[in-house]
């Protein structure tokens, strides 16, 4: 019914023969329409588990980047804020859920207390090395993703903290500031912001990148005269059982006919109190989600973009007013915005090579949980943890294990085990 109503499916087109002047359009105030949220179990399943996969991926990158490829728990705890794990969940508890990814060993500190250290299993190391290889092969593509993100902003600048929040979604390397940005000095530079933070500035505007995903898809399917109308309609689909009232159907039909403003174009002339402006906001986040690998991101990440994108207050209400374009999942105690058109069921329409790596980690995590529940790793812990870390701990011995400075760190005692260590603590 909705395909017939809007004349669009998963591949959007234009609403034909619709053209109105700028002044007439600006007279339309923002219509007070509120659509109910309906749970979508299919997209919830897509979001479920992403938090743990992200945390695992970050920990793997941190451990692998260390000189010994092995780190104590108190060192890993310093990065806890980046993992997005529940505050009540101990980091050691999370890591020990996946013994086929994180190999644990321990030795005594200068005070004689056992200190857990973690390295990567051969399976995890192989996956991560494949990931590094893909990142090298995808340098130009990832560069363009970051360029387009900066092109969406008013001043072509974003604070590094904002990019850090989006780097996992964009597919950037964990240490992109050191391993990626310096490779593209013709595109990016670091600048000092007025609030004394460090920002990343775009140096070169590429017109070829300023074509939005919606424009790109439409140009492949529509006639030239339809493109000139400028009334691009977004792909719309609803959760099974979603009941749309007649008033809402009529409003959405007319809203789709409004002019489409490119997210890369200057929109300062638009009145933020109009539906025309709202359609531009929807277009901005439609494009932003297309820049991400999973076509989804946490709502809080989007909220931090209000000022750089020069958006009005409460702009994220657009997600709730357009549940046929975006779905807000409430899994994992957070709100995640998902682009509906990006999925056929639970399968992504575009399957990036990095997604395959993440699916590989997800499979490892599932297997690790299952094997751990069967006691597989409990029986083999001595062999796996001591032999697997012999070289790393020998290096640690040469550096006097843990310095007194580290021992006094406020996060040091996070390594207290929530379950007894299975292997004896020893110096190797």
Image (cartoon, rainbow, N blue to C red):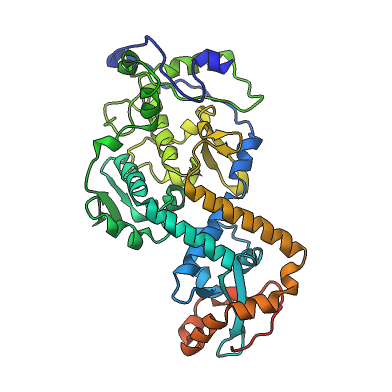
Picture residue at 71% right of the left edge, 70% below the top: 377
Task: Quadrant for residue 220, please give it.
Answer: top left
Picture residue at 51% right of the left edge, 28% below the top: 321
Left of 267 or right of it: where is 68?
right
Name the quarter where the C terminus is drawn.
Answer: bottom right
Picture residue at 72% right of the left edge, 74% below the top: 380
Residue placed most toward the observer, 291 or 363? 363
Task: Quadrant for residue 115, please give it.
Answer: bottom right
Picture residue at 60% right of the left edge, 65% below the top: 101
Name the quarter where the N terminus is drawn.
Answer: top right
* Residue 81 visible from this viewpoint: no
Left of 415 or right of it: where is 399?
left
* Residue 254 drawn above or below residue 126: above
Left of 193 or right of it: where is 313?
right
Task: Quadrant for residue 256, please give it.
Answer: top left
**Residue 36 locus on image (x, y percent):** 59, 27
Residue placed most toward the observer, 4 or 94? 4
**Residue 348 locus on image (x, y percent):** 54, 38
View extreme (right): residue = 374
**Residue 378 locus on image (x, y percent):** 74, 72
View extreme (top): residue = 17
* Residue 134 drawn above or below residue 412: above
Number of marks in the image? 0
**Residue 294 locus on image (x, y percent):** 50, 43
* Residue 72 visible from this viewpoint: yes
């Amino acid at each position: 019914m909705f395909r017939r109503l809007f004349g669009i499916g998963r591949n959007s087109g234009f609403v034909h023969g619709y053209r109105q002047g700028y002044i007439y359009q600006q007279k339309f105030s923002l219509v007070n329409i509120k659509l109910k949220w309906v749970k979508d179990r299919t997209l919830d399943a897509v979001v479920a588990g992403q938090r743990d996969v992200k945390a695992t991926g970050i920990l793997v990158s941190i451990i692998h980047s260390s000189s010994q490829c092995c780190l104590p728990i108190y060192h890993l705890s310093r990065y806890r804020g980046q993992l997005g794990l529940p505050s009540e969940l101990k980091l050691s508890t999370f890591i020990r859920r996946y013994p086929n990814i994180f190999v644990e060993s321990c030795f005594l500190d200068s005070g004689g207390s056992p200190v857990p250290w973690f390295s990567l299993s051969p399976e995890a190391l192989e996956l991560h090395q494949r990931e590094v290889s893909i990142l090298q092969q995808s340098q130009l593509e990832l560069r363009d993703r970051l360029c387009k993100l900066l092109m969406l902003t008013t001043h072509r600048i974003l604070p590094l903290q904002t990019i850090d929040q989006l780097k996992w979604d964009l597919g950037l390397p964990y240490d992109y500031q050191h391993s990626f940005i310096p490779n593209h000095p013709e595109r990016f530079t670091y600048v000092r912001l007025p609030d004394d933070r460090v920002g990343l500035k775009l140096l070169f505007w590429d017109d070829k990148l300023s074509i939005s995903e919606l424009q790109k898809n439409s140009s492949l399917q529509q006639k030239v005269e339809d493109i000139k109308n400028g009334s691009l309609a977004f792909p719309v689909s609803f959760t099974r059982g979603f009941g749309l009232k007649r008033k809402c159907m009529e409003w959405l039909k007319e809203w789709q006919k409004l002019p489409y403003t490119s997210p890369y174009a200057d929109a300062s002339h638009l009145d933020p109190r109009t539906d025309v402006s709202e359609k531009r906001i929807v277009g901005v986040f439609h494009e932003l989600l297309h820049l991400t690998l999973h076509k989804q991101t946490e709502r809080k990440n989007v909220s931090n973009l209000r000022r750089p994108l020069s958006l009005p207050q409460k702009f994220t209400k657009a997600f709730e007013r357009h549940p046929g374009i975006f779905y807000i999942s409430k899994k994992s105690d957070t709100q995640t915005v998902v682009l509906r058109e990006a999925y056929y069921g639970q399968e992504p329409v575009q399957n990036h090579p990095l997604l395959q790596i993440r699916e590989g980690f997800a499979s490892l995590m599932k297997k690790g949980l299952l094997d751990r529940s069967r006691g597989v790793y409990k029986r083999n812990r001595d062999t796996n943890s001591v032999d697997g870390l012999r070289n790393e701990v020998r290096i640690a011995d040469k550096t006097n294990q843990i310095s007194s400075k580290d021992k006094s760190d406020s996060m040091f005692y996070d390594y207290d085990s929530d379950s007894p260590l299975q292997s004896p603590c020893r110096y190797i």
